[in-house]
Amino acid sequence: MATATTTTGKRLKLHEVNWGSYSIYMVNVLAIVLLALTRKNFPRYPNLYSLVFGLSMEFLLVLATTFLLIMGEVDLSIGSVFAFAGVFTGYLVANLELPIWVSIPITLCATGIIGLINGTLVVRLKANSLMITIGTMILFRGVADGLINFLGGITYPSEYRAIAGFKIFSVHFTIFLMLAAVIILEYLLRNHAAFKKLFYIGSNTLSARLYGIRVDRVKLSVFAASGVLAGLAGILAASRSGQTVWNTGQGLEFKMITAAILGGASLFGGKGSIVKSILGLLLIAVILNGLVMFNINPVWTNVVVGIVLIIAIFVDTRINRDKIEY
Amino acid sequence: MVKVLRNLFRSKEFIAIFLIIVIFLILSFGSTTFLNVTTFESFQTSIAPNAIIATGMMLLLISGVFDLSVGSVMGLAGAITAILIASRFPVLPSILVGLGIGLVFGFFNGFLVAYVGVNPLITTLGTMYIGRGLVKAFMSGDRRYGVPVKAPEFLILGQGKILGVYHIFWIMLIIVALAQFLTLRTDAGRKLYYIGSNHEAARLVGIKVKRIRVLTFMLCSLLAAFTGILVTSYFGTSSIILGTNLELQIIISCLIGGASIAGGKGLVVGSLAGVVFMTMVVSVFNILEIGIYWQNIIVGIILVFIVALDAYLVGRRKKALGEV
């Protein structure tokens, strides 16, 4: 008889399984099968490989977004930090002629500090994380644009460009990195006490505090981690494209929130899963790939992602509507 | 008299007015090019559009929400109206279509926020991207460098003057005065403050919170669409970048002008003061020839500072009321 297991290991009958929590798997399968049947270019290896490779360039951002959403916080500055990290590393390598293994840690420290600034403002002043990080989003967009202008459209040195091209068994290492990170983090998120705190904070901050969780410290470290992850993703992406242009990473924050919410995370906190967030990102990538396959003008991309976001949030709010009202 | 003055100094609007006077004095004495007719003219056309949108935004902020899609709605309404008129559609219906787009976006935002209960930031972030995407889609191909409009009866709207002052500026003054009067002197306006202070209590005393929410969102988007049409008429051409990144500048203006993210506070006149302040800041940038990315950095810092200050003040008020 078909059974499923809950996190506590209890066996469930088929009708007791919460099928709603598996919807992201089904929608993905449906979208992929539909595209594979209608477009013969879709299921070819180069297309699928570039789909997964593209995913492995952006997955670090969705990790950051998911961790924050589980706590009920949002970081909208990741797109700007992503652009900043790419161009800042380029500046260190090309202009200051620092070796790449020195430049990357410096950049990651810088983006970590940006995350800490976001976190400090949110935690200390109890400010709305959406508004604060919109401020830092514009701020670091300005810094990134300034640096891009200063560098004047150069192509980065080859040792910087080589990072994203590094392959293991003729597969890009970022894909292995993604698989490893997803498996390890998903396991930790479900089983490790330090990660479970995120869920407690997201479900009920006050009672989490009463039970002795250092809410402020946890939030601060996750915001810092969000900065570092966005920085790492930015370095990888800049290394892949060889340069940073002025709109690099614009709108990424919004794509990541959409992905995480498609994957069952909620703006109200307390929910989320790494595997499902990645699947949410995959779904968006498949939809955008489908637009290309059907020769739809790429200017419609943002319209489509916007509509997907609104639908996802609509469903999220329907499920959680007893929680809050505007 | 003393009491009036004391209240004036305590009010948050005073910060904006004080800053405006300081910057104005610095500019007048520090720059030889500031005090002349051209500056006055360009001030009219840079303050008026932002002030009209800020009026709608202020009404939303008073009632405790805000709208990030205003820039996209402005751009979309301007683009569609220009495209229609350029393809020999009559002027008035074209303008009505542009305004209709504003109403549709406003209704969509308001419905999702009030009746579905979606976070206003995420809702309007989504409609912001949808609107901007639609602008790019409609203005692609040959239209990407702008759609020139030549119909004189459309151009008079933005380029005409009465008593040497642009129509846009007069329209702005009328809208601000009307909105100020409505919020302070009528029931409908006062309800916005009740909703902003405590929407649950407002609902319990019988105020139709959801309906008013939707109407406020529609009004805000309508004003944004109207502004887009006015600005398109002023430039005589539609532009793909019209209204880009405007929403945050407007919200910052309102926050400087005395609004609070938490709602229940602010005056429409304050939003006008905030817009004048932001316009002055930008003109300082231009006079000092500061690059656009530095402008972004400074605007970002101002926003973080204002939001942090606002959160601090709200926190202190809550502490004083014993709510923490």
Image (spheres, rainbow, N blue to C red):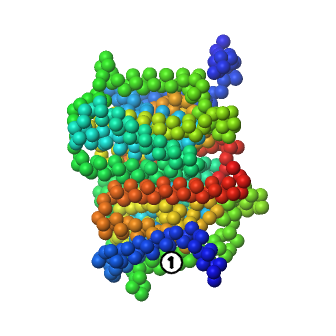
Is A112 or B249 nearer to us in this picture?
Answer: A112
The quarter in which the N terminus of chain B is drawn is bottom right
Q: Is residue A259 above or below residue B24?
A: above
Residue at 60% of width from left, 58% of height from top? B313
Mark 1 lies on a secondary structure that is: helix
Residue A83 visible in the displayed image: yes
Would residue A95 appear left or right of B302 to someone viewing this image? left
Q: Quadrant of residue B216?
A: bottom right
Residue under circle 1? B173
Residue A162, placed above or below residue B317: above
Question: In the figure, is residue A270 to the left or right of B222?
Answer: right
Q: Chain of mark 1?
A: B
Instruction: Reply above or below: B239 against A56.
Output: below
Q: Residue at x 49, y 56 (%)?
A: B305
Residue A124, horizontal then vertical, whole percent: 56, 47
Q: Which quadrant of the figure has residue B322?
A: bottom right
Q: Give the residue drawn at x 56%, y 77%.
A: B177
